[in-house]
Image (spheres, rainbow, N blue to C red):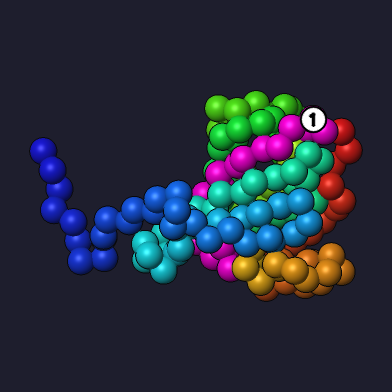
Amino acid sequence: MSVAPTSTQKLIIKFPTDKQWIKAVPGEQAAICVRGSDVSDAYSVVELMVAPLGGPPMHIHENEDEIIVVLEGCVRCVCDETRFDAPAGTTFVVPRGVPHAWRSLPDTTSRVLLTFTPSGMEGYFEEVAGRPQEEWATIAKKYACLLVGPRIEL
C-alpha cells in the first residue's frame, strides 16, 4: 500500500557528484546532503570526512536531536558520562541537551553521517568554514549549539 505524498513531500536525490564539499574546520570537510528547507525543516543531513584526530569539541544542541552514523573509520565518543568507540556501521542518537563529542582515532580518516532533527544545524557548517577557531563558539551559539569543553582526549 502506498501513501500519496502531501504537497510538502518531494523526492530528493543527491548523487555523489552532486555533493559540494565545504572545508568546515581544519581536518574536516562537510557536504550538506539534505537541507531543512527541502523537508519543511523536519531534519537535515550532513556528511563529514574527518581526518585522524579530527572531530568537534564537547558541545550541546539545545534544539536538535542528533543521529550519528559512522560510515567509515572509527571514532571515540563521549555522550554525557558514557565513553565508547564507534567503528564503521555504528549508529547512535544523542538527545538534545546532552553534552557530547567524538573524535576520529589517530590512525584513521572517518566518514560520518549526521542527521539533525529538527533542522537548523546545517547552516553552522557553511558559516564556520574558513573562520578562526576563536569564532566557532559565537557561530555555534547562533545555531543554539553551546561549545562546553575542548575536544575529547584519546
Which sits in the foreground, 69 or 59? 69
Quarter-of-image position of residue 109: top right
Magenta range: 105-123
Residue name at image x 62 percent, y 62 percent = 22
The x and y percentages for residue 37 are: 41, 69
Which sits in the foreground, 117 or 151? 151
Count up the numbered dots: 1
The x and y percentages for residue 88 are: 60, 28
The x and y percentages for residue 10 are: 26, 60
Lateral position of residue 5 relative to residue 147, left or right:
left
Evaluate whether residue 22 shows in this view: yes
Outermost front residue: 17
Residue 145 to residue 153: above or below: below
Circle 1: element type:
loop
The x and y percentages for residue 120 are: 54, 65
Residue 116: in magenta span: yes
Quarter-of-image position of residue 6: bottom left
Mark 1, residue position: 107
Under mark 1, the amino acid is: Asp
Residue name at image x 40 percent, y 50 percent = 15
Residue name at image x 56 percent, y 62 percent = 122
Lateral position of residue 74 relative to residue 54, left or right:
left
Which sits in the foreground, 59 or 28? 28
Quarter-of-image position of residue 38: bottom left
Lateral position of residue 121 relative to residue 83, left or right:
left
Evaluate whether residue 77 shows in this view: no
